[in-house]
Image (cartoon, rainbow, N blue to C red):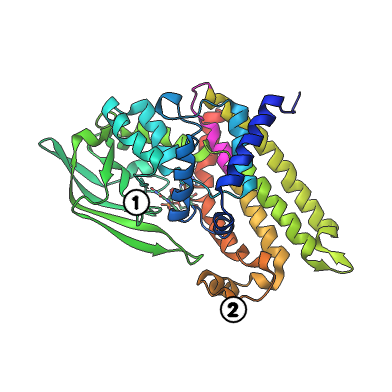
Amino acid sequence: MDFTFSDADEAFRREVREFFDGHLTPEMRDAAARVTTVFADKDLAMRWQQILADRGWAAPAWPEEFGGTGWSVTQKYIFAEESAKAGAPGLIPLGLRMLAPVLFRYGTPEQQQYYLPRILSGEHYWCQGYSEPGSGSDLSSLKTRADRDGDDYIVNGTKIWTTHAHFADHIFCLVRTDSSGRPQAGITFLLIPMNAPGITVEPIVTLAGDHEVNQVFFDDVRVPQANRVGPENEGWTVAKYLLEFERGGGGSAPRLEVALGELKAMAAREPQGQGSLLDEPAFRRRLAELEIRLQALAFSELATLARMSRGESPGAGSSLAKNTSVAIEQDLTTLKLEAIGYYGLPHANLISLNGANEAWVGADHAETVTARYLNARAASIFGGSQEVQKNIIAKAVLGL
Ligand SMILES: Cc1cc2nc3c(=O)[nH]c(=O)nc-3n(C[C@H](O)[C@H](O)[C@H](O)COP(=O)(O)OP(=O)(O)OC[C@H]3O[C@@H](n4cnc5c(N)ncnc54)[C@H](O)[C@@H]3O)c2cc1C
């Protein structure tokens, strides 16, 4: 197998690099390097999205007719790789990579025309209203109701763990429109503006000290039926399709490769005996194991990208990709935490989270490690827990 890039691909790589050099300011790179949460800070991410959108590069995976780039799989991979290497802020996937594919397949022409350009430009900022108290893994048991009233639905209930609901101006939501049959059969997929009267958002602060997630309450919220995606009571199919993209449509290997490089550089600066931690055989073995797993992930993500460029969805294999990349990310953040030793104590981390950088004691490279370690624990829960992904793999991939 030939893994070298063609001259044309290398020219494309230079074009991307030059663009990043010209547009990604040191201040943006620095802010991106300090992100310790799942999603980058909203203003930072949207600023970068705007810059990419102006160049026509905000949504490489979209069909060209809606504003995609028309790039080959290799070009998309090169772009992701160069973004990670340049330390570009991650784009928020909720609209670009989760809702958009749903609209391509299930949206009406009017919905496509209205929402897609606004997702691309960043004018609309979306959040995801799937989980409820008591309905997470068992999502189809959800109880938030939407009752018909003329041309509208009246929505009542609550959603929980809603990432960035405090920033979002729109929410895509699963609601119950029928309780008479199988739970999956009575679900509908709705698009709701967050400024609709009757919506309130309450913050939830996580173990890592971050405000990323929220609880959202709906009290007699009026939503036009025109905001429904797909037929009434068939939202479960739409919801599952979106989850394939949430779990496996992204490609996390380039970002993890950069993080692995950071870990090596960090270990080389941590004194150990006569040398550094990087010389320590047990540490090197764990590093090597991580690197091998990461290479395997990179190749399987390339295969997924290739399928997606042929118009296929990521499929149930996305559950495998999610579990693999999350396990690598958690092991990587664990090794980083071990590498910095005492400086990983949570109280030091809290000082840095509060912005009191002058109070930081220890090496600069240690500053965000604990916050990232804590935040990464959530990755095996959101988007469907790792146990639930294993159940899907057992059934849909292995046929057990
Ligand atoms: C940081 C973060 C961000 C999130 N963002 C969003 C968001 O933006 N929008 C949204 O809708 N949701 C969001 N979620 C919610 C997330 O999808 C749910 O937390 C997840 O699906 C698990 O549901 P639960 O919390 O109700 O746990 P439960 O379903 O109660 O699970 C508890 C435990 O039981 C295990 N378990 C449950 N069922 C089974 C089974 N059948 N077999 C084996 N083990 C099982 C689980 O793996 C887990 O370990 C977020 C969660 C987190 C932590």
Residue 314 x %, y %: 51, 30
In the displayed orientation, state which residue is furthest to the bottom: 359
Percent coordinates x, y for residue 270 in the rendering? 77, 66
Q: Which residue is mark 2?
A: 359
Question: In what quadrant of the picture does the N terminus appear?
Answer: top right
Which image quarter: residue 84? top right
- Badge 2: residue crowd in 10 Å (few <14, some 14–19, many ≥20): few
The image shows residue 169 at horizontal and vertical percentages of 31, 49
Query: Any mark on residue 168, and which?
Result: 1
**Circle 1: element type:** loop
Describe residue 359's horizontal placement relative to residue 169 as left or right. right
**Residue 231 lies in the magenta-colored region:** no
The amino acid sitting under disc 1 is Ala
- Mark 2 and ligand 1: say if the CB distance to the nearest ligand atom is below 8 Å: no
SS label for mark 2:
helix
Residue lying at 56% horizontally and 62% vertically, measured from the top left: 374
Looking at the image, residue 230 lies above or below residue 377: above
